[in-house]
């Protein structure tokens, strides 16, 4: 019998240094290298980032703020999932419990609610910023497809609205029930398939247990999952497209110049050759004057935007209580019954385009609820292909070449805001207009 | 190692991050503090103090702390009232001020707290643990605490604490008399005396001239028309005004003015608001009557009127408002004049013959005969015939009296 020699342990693969955490104080270049390869942040972000795209005044960091709000919503939604019971009998009571007796319950709920509203606002502002700077346009680099990232962004806006809308129903109070009633009734104005769309949406013909569980599943799994997936893709595309559009602009406007080699840096070419003095011609991206290291400058700013968002929402949540009206009652329509605020402009258009002529009524739900939002979203989606302005203005705020389209965009936004204001603040009982100086008639109580 | 890029950012961004850190800490302090800041903590400490002064430290140590609740699964109620009202089941606080007063024992014998909770009788918001919210004096809570204070707000003219009786009567609606519910008992007597059932169905019995009142207490406050009501806009205020003068709040109403005083009108308003379904398991109603049957006397009286000589008037519906004394028919709501002497009475009131008047009635009768009791010409002829017969009997009686 021959003894088989015990195989020698595998020699450590060159370059692989398994390490649980990266070193904060690297003792060698190799440690520093490990720190880079095992650092998620360094892979989420490029190594260098242009100073111009770091500026607060360019992007207002609205995308980061939106992502921070999404993170906050996920974090605050998690404890709510443990406490909330998605059944018609128990939903309202479980929200009362969250509000009154759960430790930090009312704060968590307020954080979740305020962050949700804020996210709708942040997404819209982010979209407006991208539009005004023409950031959906391709600059100079090859393989850019910013227009597709814009389309993904529009889809993410719709998902955000739908996420907020599905969350609206969950407390199962009058506000929830009737906002969803108004919202889904608008959907039923779609020609031919309207009734079916509404039925699919609410899982039947009436808003009941089937609707609640449907909205709950959409709200906690399907939509956040889809949004998270698209978010990852959205970020990946930003990197594939060479960063913010502002960075392209930097390269366009700057003249290439000789950059003297850094005396302390070792330049290598695929490990074949190393040296200290190749002379390169560089434009902005690698130029030390116009770029900074992503870590820590970019990560620090991302931290500021994220934690700043957390702090603001958290403090607001202490002072702004979340409403909870009477339990949902299909027999009593609150007066006035309103859609969630971000759909109020649509409800307002539905009202204004509903024309009564004697006993004959033209229902505005088709125009206000289907045609108009359909056209707007359609235009928004295909806009990058319609925008014929030169790529030189990519990443510039309000360039002359895009003056008309920016103006039209502003006008549409202002109109939407005005209609939203009218719907929110001026529509009183019986959907009458009340001016700010007029008091609404008081609503009756039982005792 | 490579030299760091000469970055301008740390100089501004680091202090900025530090400030945000401060805000985060501040927000933690704020939400911790706001979560601690509940009224019940104060009341529990105060109650402990009360017990210590009255019964000594040892008893005080037995006082429970933290949120307390009575969970009644059958009723779906979680009443946290006892978080502050800790003396409810303590002897020795009978004369203390609320929230530290012992609950009177008598009502609890038939309604044990663990089976009924607090809010099923008292109203209020059992889920809440702060004073204003728990007492239900907040928007979107339609069942406020039915307290003496609320009664004072309403300037109840009788017992200021009577509002709670509304909740008694949700289960005790079929009682002729409920112990301790004086206002409701008064209202129930009025319902019988004034013959509300002549026009209204109440507990599935009665006439169909007015609306069915069996579940009127369920009607939402939004469903009333307050346009002619001054002052508070509540279902309760509407009913009080309506009982005093129906036409004033509802112009189409044909309900007569009964001349109720404020106490009576308020008692009736409480009664009708209590007429809503008792959403409790059957076992809870074991001690209370389950249906509303007329007393034997009432039943005998009705049978007598329906089968006696005044039968035609009862069946046609005249007897709802008019008595026909000569036949022993007594109208439940004596709104119109006695029909025994209608033949001469109509002549003296309107200066027209009974034939002429019935053919073309004026005033209230024109409304009644065009909307509620619609008679063909043949039926009208029978009516005249019947009235003449009654008048003949009336004349005979008068003659006998004079003799």
Image (cartoon, coloured by chain):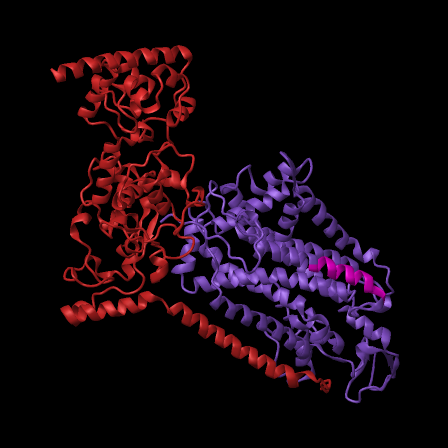
Quarter of the image that includes the C terminus of chain B: top left
Instruction: Tell me where the magenta segment starts and ends, as one range.
Output: A401-414
Q: Position of residue A93 (x, y in %)?
A: 41, 51
Residue shown at 13% from the left, 17% from the top: B402
Outermost residue to the left:
B403
Q: Position of residue A233 (x, y in %)?
A: 70, 60
Quarter of the image that includes the N terminus of chain B: bottom right
State whether residue B173 is above or below residue A239: above
State whether residue A424 is above or below residue A204: below
Q: Colour of chain A?
A: purple
State whether residue A136 is above or below residue A174: below
Left or right: where A58 falls relative to B333: right
Q: Position of residue B33 (x, y in %)?
A: 41, 72
Within the magenta stretch, is there residue A406? yes
Q: Which chain is red?
A: B
Left or right: where A390 falls relative to A446: right
Within the magenta stretch, is there residue B156? no
Q: Nearer the viewer, residue B343 or A192?
A: B343
Q: Nearer the viewer, residue B42 or A418?
A: A418
Residue shown at 37% from the left, 57% from the top: B137
Outermost residue to the bottom:
A263
Asked where in the image residue A356 lies, by quadrant, the reply is: top right
State whether residue A72 is above or below residue A39: above
Residue B66 seen from this side: yes
Residue shown at 36% from the left, 47% from the top: B237
Q: Position of residue A290 (x, y in %)?
A: 78, 81
Q: Main secondary structure of the magenta part?
A: helix
Residue B279 seen from this side: no
Q: Nearer the viewer, residue A17 or B306?
A: B306
Left or right: where A435 falls relative to B260: right
């Amino acid at each position: 019998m021959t003894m088989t020699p015990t195989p020698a342990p595998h020699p450590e693969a060159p370059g692989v240094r398994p390490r649980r955490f990266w070193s904060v104080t690297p003792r060698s270049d190799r440690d520093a290298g490990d720190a880079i390869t095992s650092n998620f942040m360094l892979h989420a972000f490029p190594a260098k980032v242009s100073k111009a795209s770091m500026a607060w005044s360019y992007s207002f960091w609205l995308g980061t703020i939106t992502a921070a709000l999404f993170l906050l919503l996920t974090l605050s939604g998690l404890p709510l999932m443990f406490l909330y019971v998605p059944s018609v009998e128990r939903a309202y009571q479980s929200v009362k419990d969250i509000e009154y007796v759960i430790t930090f319950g009312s704060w968590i709920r307020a954080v979740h609610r305020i962050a949700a509203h804020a996210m709708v606002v942040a997404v819209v502002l982010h979209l407006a910023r991208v539009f005004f700077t023409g950031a959906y346009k391709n600059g100079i680099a090859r393989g850019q497809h910013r227009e597709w990232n814009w389309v993904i962004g529009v889809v993410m806006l719709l998902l955000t609205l739908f996420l907020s809308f599905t969350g609206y129903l969950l407390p199962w109070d009058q506000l929830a029930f009737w906002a969803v009633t108004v919202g889904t009734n608008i959907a039923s104005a779609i020609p031919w398939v309207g009734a079916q769309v509404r039925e699919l949406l609410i899982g039947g013909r009436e808003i009941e247990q089937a609707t609640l569980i449907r909205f709950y599943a959409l709200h906690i799994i399907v939509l956040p999952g889809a949004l998270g997936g698209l978010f990852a893709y959205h970020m990946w595309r930003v990197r594939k497209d060479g960063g913010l559009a502002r960075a392209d602009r930097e390269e366009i406007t700057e003249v290439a110049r000789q950059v003297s080699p850094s005396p302390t840096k070792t330049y290598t070419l695929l490990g074949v050759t190393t040296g200290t003095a190749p002379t390169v011609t560089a434009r902005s991206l690698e130029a030390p004057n116009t770029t900074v290291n992503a870590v820590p400058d970019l990560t620090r700013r991302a931290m500021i935007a994220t934690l700043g968002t957390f702090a603001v929402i958290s403090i607001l949540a202490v002072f702004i209580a979340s409403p909870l009206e009477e339990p949902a009652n299909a027999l009593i329509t609150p007066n006035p019954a309103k859609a969630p605020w971000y759909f109020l402009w649509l409800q307002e258009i539905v009202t204004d385009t509903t024309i009564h002529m004697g006993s004959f009524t033209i229902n505005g739900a088709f125009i206000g609820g289907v045609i108009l939002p359909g056209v707007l979203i359609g235009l928004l989606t295909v806009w990058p292909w319609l925008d014929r302005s030169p790529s030189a203005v990519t990443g510039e705020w309000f360039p002359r070449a895009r003056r008309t389209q920016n103006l039209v965009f502003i006008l549409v936004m202002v109109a939407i805001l005005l209609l939203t204001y009218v719907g929110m603040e001026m529509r009183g009982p019986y959907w009458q207009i009340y001016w700010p100086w007029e008091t609404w008639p008081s609503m009756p109580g039982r005792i | 190692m490579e030299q760091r890029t000469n970055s301008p950012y740390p100089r501004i961004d680091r202090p900025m991050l530090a400030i945000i850190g401060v805000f985060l800490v501040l927000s933690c302090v704020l939400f911790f503090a706001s979560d601690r800041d509940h009224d019940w903590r104060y009341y529990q400490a105060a109650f402990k103090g009360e017990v210590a002064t009255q019964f000594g430290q040892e008893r005080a140590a037995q006082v429970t702390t933290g949120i307390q609740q009575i969970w009644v699964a059958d009723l779906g109620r979680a009443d946290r009232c006892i978080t502050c009202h800790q003396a409810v089941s303590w002897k020795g606080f009978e004369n203390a001020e609320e929230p530290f007063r012992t609950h009177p024992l008598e009502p609890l014998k038939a309604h044990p707290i663990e089976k009924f909770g607090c809010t099923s009788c008292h109203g209020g918001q059992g889920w809440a643990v702060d004073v204003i919210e728990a007492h239900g004096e907040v928007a979107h809570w339609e069942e406020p605490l039915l307290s003496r204070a609320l009664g004072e707000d309403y300037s109840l003219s009788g017992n200021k604490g009577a509002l709670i009786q509304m909740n008694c009567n949700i289960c005790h609606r079929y009682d002729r008399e409920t112990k301790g519910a004086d206002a409701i008992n008064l209202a129930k007597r009025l319902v019988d005396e004034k013959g509300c059932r002549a026009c209204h169905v109440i507990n599935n019995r009665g006439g169909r001239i007015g609306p069915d009142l069996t579940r009127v207490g369920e009607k939402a406050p939004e469903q009333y028309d307050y346009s002619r009501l001054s002052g508070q806009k509540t279902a309760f205020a509407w009913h009080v005004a309506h009982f005093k003068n129906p036409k004033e709040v509802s112009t189409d109403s044909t309900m007569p003015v009964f001349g109720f005083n404020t106490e009576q009108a308020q008692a009736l308003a409480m009664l009708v608001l209590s007429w809503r379904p008792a959403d409790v398991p059957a076992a809870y109603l074991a001690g209370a009557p389950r249906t509303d049957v007329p007393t034997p006397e009432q039943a005998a009286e009705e049978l007598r009127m329906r089968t006696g000589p005044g039968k035609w008037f009862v069946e046609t519906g005249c007897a709802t408002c008019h008595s026909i004394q000569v036949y022993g028919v007594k109208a439940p709501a004596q709104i119109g004049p006695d029909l025994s002497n209608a033949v001469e009475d109509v002549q003296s009131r309107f200066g027209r013959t009974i034939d002429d008047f019935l053919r073309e009635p004026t005033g209230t009768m024109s409304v009644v005969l065009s909307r509620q009791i619609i008679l063909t010409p043949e039926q009208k002829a029978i009516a005249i015939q019947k009235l003449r017969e009654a008048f003949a009997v009336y004349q005979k009686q008068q003659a006998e009296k004079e003799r």
